[in-house]
Image (cartoon, helix red, strand yellow):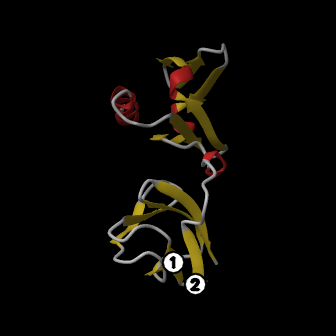
């Protein structure tokens, strides 16, 4: 019952968010829905039914759903191409941010959790990523976004 109330709450606030996608995460993988294409979400016992405007229907049992969240990108591949590199690698534990002095840099995990926020004082300033484990991250600064891979 708590899970059902949580999902209903999430769906209620989705309309006020800037998200463009709803992601339903299960052990079998993620299913991504474009919010503007969602027609109806219904609950039938322990099943969540998702109907889209294009006629496609999906369903999942409440027990199989690990998480539902809203995102402005459905995957890293959806990130728009940008001219010039926002990030240059200095070493395994440092990156240089090519953004204007005074910009705020934020580094996010792939789940959207903000892991680091820092203001840079000079263009090309080094930012330590020593505390981050190996993986893929999203870097945002001054309206630009890119991905990095820490090895």
Q: Quadrant of residue 52?
A: top right
- SS of the residue under disc 2: strand
At 55% from the left and 37% from the top, the residue drawn is 24
At 56% from the left and 21% from the top, the residue drawn is 37
Q: Quadrant of residue 54?
A: top right
Q: Picture coordinates of residue 115 (x, y %)?
A: 41, 66
Reply above or below: 123 against 17.
Answer: below
| 149 sits to left or right of 93 | right
The reply to whether the C-beta atoms of the residues labelled 1 and 2 are less than 8 Å apart is yes
- Camera-nearest residue between 85 and 132: 85
- Camera-nearest residue between 126 and 31: 126
Q: Picture coordinates of residue 31 (x, y %)?
A: 62, 37
Q: Mark on residue 96? A: 1
Q: Picture coordinates of residue 88 (x, y %)?
A: 58, 75
Q: Mark on residue 115? A: none
Disc 2 crowd rating (10 Å Cα; few below 14, some 14-19, many 20+) is few
At 40% from the left and 32% from the top, the residue drawn is 7
Reply above or below: 35 against 103.
Answer: above
Disc 1 crowd rating (10 Å Cα; few below 14, some 14-19, many 20+) is some
Q: Picture coordinates of residue 132 (x, y %)?
A: 49, 76
Q: Earlier in the sequence, mark 1 or mark 2?
A: 2
- SS of the residue under disc 1: strand
Q: Alpha carbon of mark 1 to alpha carbon of mark 2: how far?
A: 6 Å
| 3 sits to left or right of 53 | left
- Residue beneath label 2, please? 90
């Amino acid at each position: 019952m708590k899970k059902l109330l949580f999902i209903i709450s999430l769906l209620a606030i989705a309309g006020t968010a800037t998200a463009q996608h709803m992601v339903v995460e299960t052990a079998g993988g993620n299913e991504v829905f474009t919010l503007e294409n969602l027609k109806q979400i219904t609950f039938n016992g322990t099943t969540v039914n998702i109907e889209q405007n294009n006629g496609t229907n999906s369903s999942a049992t409440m027990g199989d759903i690990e998480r539902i969240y809203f995102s402005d990108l459905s995957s890293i591949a959806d990130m728009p191409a940008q001219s010039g590199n926002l990030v240059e690698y200095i070493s395994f534990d440092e990156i240089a941010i090519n953004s204007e002095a005074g910009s705020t840099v934020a580094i996010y995990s792939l789940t959207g959790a903000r892991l680091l926020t820092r203001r840079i004082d000079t263009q090309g300033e080094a930012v330590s990523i020593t505390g981050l484990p190996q993986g893929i991250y999203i870097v945002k600064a001054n309206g630009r976004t890119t991905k990095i891979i820490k090895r």
